[in-house]
Structures are given as structure tokens and as C-alpha cells.
Amino acid sequence: MVLKTFGWSFAVTALGLAFAAWQWGWEAFGIVLILSILEISLSFDNAVVNAGILKKMNAFWQKIFLTIGILIAVFGMRLVFPVVIVAISAKVGPIEAVQLAMDQPDRYEDLVTDAHAAIASFGGMFLLMIFLDFIFEEREHKWLAWLERPLAKLGKVDMLSVCIALIVLMVTAITFATNAHTSTGHADKSATVLLSGVAGLITYLVVGGLSGYFEDKLEEEEEREHEEEEKAKREGKQVSAVGLAGKAAFFLFLYLEVLDASFSFDGVIGAFAITNHIFWMALGLGIGAMYVRSLTVYLVRQGTLDDYVYLEHGAHYAIGALAVILLVTIQHEISEIITGLIGVVLIAASFWSSLRRNKALENSEGKAGGPEEKAEVSSGV
């Protein structure tokens, strides 16, 4: 079952890492591996959400999402989007950006270095908003309870995350952007950082707004479908559970695509904190995106939920760390290996905590004598 579901992902991983080592050496191998782990970890909750929604669809729309939808996610967001970001920031065409990366790597590096302040500010603000909205939300499970409990209470204040993000942006522009790195030395990039940061914030709000819009439409369609089912039952007609179809499934498909795009943003933007090499980025994110598909299929087929309750926390703390690192790199250089390992360590720690919690729950269930007497055991740090 595992090999059948993840076979293509394993094959793409092996080929991608082998190609990176053969073409660019062991440094590229390490960076692509880190990017793959980061993307898989950040996309784990994406796969869980996708599976939970996808199981509501009929077989036709499930196939559409797992083929056309994944093609959009892999090639549109993970492969094309990084090139578009570089092209816009460096003020060159997407094709020219790829050609420069292939034929004139030194010139490409200069363009990316000059555009780094804009990329880092845009990405840093987008990732920071994801992190802030996560930690300010009340959740059933708390990993770092001593931190998450008071922050969840603060989150009841309207627009708090936006206010904090704007304050961080202003501090960044004053502290780092006045002496930002460029290919010719240092320059004042305050205006660029402010404008790009606001653009990142707006992008996050627009993506969130679209997700909310499609979610509302979906709820309306599901309610209508439910009413029709109840009417059919009252009339004595047989109701077959084949999954949502028609307009409801179409809205569900659009909602999933918007959700997947929003989930993709964090991985793509976070990748810029690790490397500016678009080919390494494309390989790492592409490998990770394959696992999103495999995990989605696996979860739909198995009907299982996320057993590792702190993994989502670790992924979001990694996002927060990447946001801070991106903003700091406007002026100070940070090793790509260190940047990547911070995220991996946070995610690994959350995974370990999840395993400890599951083991504690099993022990508690055994001592209690049955699941009905089982108490929730928290292994949060």
C-alpha cells in the first residue's frame, strides 16, 4: 500500500537528488534535500486538509483534483512561481531570468542580490502573517503551552496580527534596509522594503479573502445538497453516497485550488531564505509537492486523520523562523545550511513530541482499561 501510493514520490526524490549531486555537487544535494524536507513538512497539513475535503467529492472530481489540480500545484506554484518572483523583483522577463540562470549565473546572482531586499520583505511579511494568525488562534492542542495559551488570549483582539506585522515592517525598514546588501555594496532600500512588505501583507489578505469566499460558497452548496437529500429521504427515494458533484463539486475544486496555492506560498517564499538558485528551488519544491499528492491519496484511501498533533505547530514555528531570517538577511548574510536546519529541527522536535504524546495516550488507555476512560495526555513542552 505504501509503496503503491508513494512509489512515484520515492522515484522523483531519488532522481532529483541524484541529478542535483551530478550537476552541481554535494552542496546542491544538501540544499535540495533540505528544501524537500521543508516543503513536505510545511505541506503535511495541506495534505490533511485536502484529504478531508476531497473525500466529499465523487470519483470524477477526485480524479480531476489529483491530476489537473496537482499539475497546477507542482508546475504552477512550485516551479513557475519562484521564477516569476525573481523576474518581477529583478525587472526582467521570466524566460530571460531562466536564461540568465543557465547562461550567465554571475549576472543572475547580481540581479537576485539587488532584488533580495524586495523578495525578503515581501516573503517575510507573508510568512509572518501565517505564523501570527496561527499562534493567535485558540487551538485544542498546544505544543508550547506556556507560550501558546497567553498568545491565544491576546489573539481575541481584532487585527492584532496585522498591527504587529506592520510594526515589524517599520522596524525592519529602519534597522536593516538603510544598509541593505546589493551587488555593488550597500544602499538605502527603505522605500523598497516598505512597499514590498505592504505588497506581501496585501497578498496574504487577498489569498485569505478568496479562501473565505469559496468556503462560504461551498457551505451554501453543501447545505443545499443536504436539503435535497433530506427531501429525497422523506419521499422514500434512495440516496446514494457518491460524493458531491455538479456545482458543489466545482466550488469545492476551486476552494481546494485556492487553499493549495495559499499553502504553496509559504514553501516557495521560505525557499528564498535558503537559496536564490531557482533550479535547486524547483527541484526541492517539486519533490515536496509530489509527497503532497501521495499523502492526500493515502489519507483519502486510509480514511485516517492526522495522528501527529504537534507537527502543524512545528511547521508554523518553522515558518515564523523563516520569516525572521528573511527580514534579517536584508542586511546580514546567514548560511543557507543554518537557515534550513532551523526549520528541520523545529519540525523534528514537534514530531518527537507528537510521538511522546501518542505513547503516553496508549499507556494511559492501557492503565484505564478502555478507551472510554482514556484521558487526554499532553506532551507539550
Image (spheres, rainbow, N blue to C red):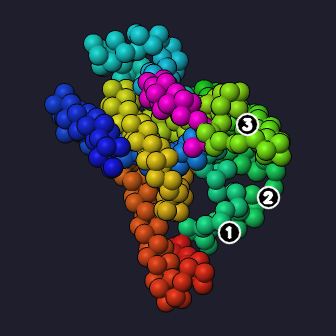
Residue beneath the point at 56% across and 79% down: 371
Q: Which mark is residue 25?
A: none
State the residue in front, 297 or 23.
297
Sort mark 1 into few (<14), some (14-19) or many (20+) by Cα contacts within 10 Å: some
Residue beneath the point at 47% across and 67% down: 354
The amino acid type found where label 1 is placed reads Arg
Q: Which residue is mark 1?
A: 149
Query: What secondary structure is marked by label 3?
Result: helix
* Magenta span main SS: helix
State the residue in front, 152 or 49.
49
Q: Which mark is residue 156?
A: 2
Residue beneath the point at 64% across and 53% down: 134
Mark 2 vs mark 3: give the one in front: 3
Sequence-wise first label, 1 or 3 = 1
Sort mark 3 into few (<14), some (14-19) or many (20+) by Cα contacts within 10 Å: many
Q: Which residue is mark 3?
A: 218
Q: Give the extent of the magenta segment.
A: 55-76
Discs 1, 3 touching: Cβ within 8 Å: no
Q: In the figure, is residue 17 to the left or right of 68?
A: left
